[in-house]
Image (cartoon, rainbow, N blue to C red):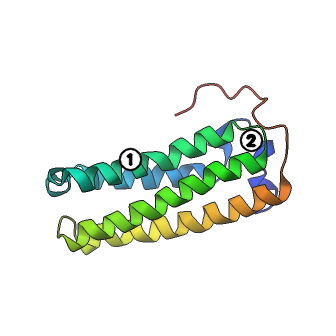
Amino acid sequence: MGRAFRAGMAHKIEELPIYPKVVAFWQAVNVLLEKPRVRNDCDLHGQISRANDSIPSNKVEGFEQGTDRAFANYLTYSKASLAEVRKRLKQAYFKKYITADELEPRLAAGEELGKMLGGFIKYLRRCDWRDRGSHDAGPQE
């Protein structure tokens, strides 16, 4: 992970290398949520939408916590939500709401993002910087 991942060095969440990956995944899933067959399955649509929104939301909330360990806990929730989105997208595929061509790149991106989150979580727990949240982060997502 190295110094580039040092959460304590970032003054805004957008400065974290993982940030654009989270946003790209969130946007790619939202495109699928607009498909009529997905929208018509209200339960599945709602589950995917809530879990997908939880990924960046927990990351932002965690960034404002007082310690790296607390941030890592929120990222763990983001990682769990990511796993749920991936599982629910597979359900949408099996129900023939989306195609394999729509599913596969999102699963691959989700797997990569999950590995990045896992590595970042380990890094934060190991470093445990304790002066988080005292900076002026300004407006977030």
Q: Could you tell me which residue is drawn at 32 percent across and 65 percent down?
A: 89
Say if residue 30 shows up in the picture. Answer: no
C-alpha gap between disc 2 and disc 1: 27 Å
Q: Residue 16's spot in the image, x, y percent?
A: 67, 48
- 75 relative to 26 in the view: left or right: right
- Mark 1 residue crowding within 10 angstroms, few (<14) / some (14–19) / many (20+): some
- Mark 2 residue crowding within 10 angstroms, few (<14) / some (14–19) / many (20+): some
Q: Residue 88's spot in the image, x, y percent?
A: 33, 64
The circle drawn on residue 119 is none
- 37 relative to 116 in the view: left or right: left
Q: Could you tell me which residue is drawn at 67 percent across and 43 percent down?
A: 15
Residue on which disc 1 sits:
50
Q: State yes or no: discs 2 and 1 in contact (Cβ < 8 Å).
A: no
Query: Residue 137's image quarter?
Result: top right
- 9 relative to 28 in the view: left or right: right
Say if residue 4 shows up in the picture. Answer: yes
Mark whose residue sits in front, 2 or 1: 1
In which quadrant of the rendered image does the N terminus lie? bottom right
Q: Could you tell me which residue is drawn at 56 percent across and 44 percent down?
A: 58
In the image, what residue type sits under mark 1?
Answer: Arg
In the image, what residue type sits under mark 2?
Answer: Ala
Element type where label 2 sits in the image: loop
Up the image or down, 33 lies above or below 126; here it is above
Element type where label 1 sits in the image: helix
Query: Residue 65's image quarter?
Result: top right
The circle drawn on residue 10 is 2
Q: Residue 111's spot in the image, x, y percent?
A: 50, 70
